[in-house]
Image: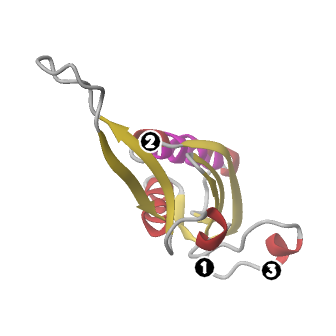
């Protein structure tokens, strides 16, 4: 989804209203402080760092074929493809694994690490985290 499609300024993917609790000595309702917008680049960076922190991941795959686009998925940038709808994100990761590792175990560990980062650091929820191991380095 492009910024124009989601109604946000270029590169921004999430907007949330933040409210403060009423002051103890004030009878007024909670004040609206404004919105928080997280740039798509920030999401990608957090996801990249979480994936690269997993033992067994050599690097992200930079040259990915055009097949994700053919089946309706977004094209990855630097090994990460994102689809964001409000505070829910769908993630496709394209990785290069280190030799002599359990590839399924690495993929599961990447899913766990990225899911935790999306939840704890970004305050968003991952609807799916698809890991595609493209090669072994």
Is residue 89 shown above or below 5?
above
What x and y, as percent, mark residue 89?
A: 61, 50
Quadrant holding the N terminus:
bottom right
Please, what secondary structure does the residue beneath circle 3 have?
loop
Q: Which residue is mark 2?
A: 123
Q: Where, by quadrant of the figure, is residue 84 drawn?
A: bottom right
- Residue 11 can be seen in this image: yes
Q: Which mark is residue 66?
A: 3
Mark 1 near mark 3, Cβ–Cβ under 8 Å? Answer: no
Q: Which mark is residue 62?
A: 1
Is residue 69 shown above or below 102?
below
Mark 1 nearby-residue class (10 Å; few <14, some 14–19, many ≥20): some
Q: How far is disc 1 from disc 3 in space, using C-alphas?
A: 12 Å
Q: Residue at x 81, y 74 (%)?
A: 69
Mark 3 nearby-residue class (10 Å; few <14, some 14–19, many ≥20): few
Q: Which mark is residue 39?
A: none
Q: Residue at x 66, y 82 (%)?
A: 63
Mark 2 nearby-residue class (10 Å; few <14, some 14–19, many ≥20): few
Please, what secondary structure does the residue beneath circle 2 have?
loop
Q: Residue at x 48, y 62 (%)?
A: 48
- Residue 137 can be seen in this image: no
What x and y, as percent, mark residue 40?
A: 50, 66
Left or right: 123, with 84 as reference point: left
Does the magenta run of residues contain 111? yes
111 and 69: which one is in front?
A: 69
């Amino acid at each position: 989804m492009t910024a124009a499609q989601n109604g946000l300024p270029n590169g921004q993917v999430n907007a949330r209203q933040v409210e403060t609790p009423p002051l103890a000595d004030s009878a007024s309702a909670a004040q609206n402080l404004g919105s928080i917008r997280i740039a798509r680049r920030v999401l990608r960076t957090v996801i990249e760092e979480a994936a690269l922190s997993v033992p067994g991941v050599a690097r992200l795959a930079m040259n990915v074929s055009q097949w994700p686009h053919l089946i309706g998925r977004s094209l990855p940038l630097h090994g990460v493809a994102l689809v964001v709808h409000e505070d829910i994100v769908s993630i496709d990761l394209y990785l290069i694994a280190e030799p002599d590792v359990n590839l399924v175990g690495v993929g599961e560990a990447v899913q766990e690490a990225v899911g935790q980062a999306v939840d704890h650091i970004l305050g968003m929820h991952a609807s799916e985290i698809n890991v595609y191991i493209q090669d072994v380095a």
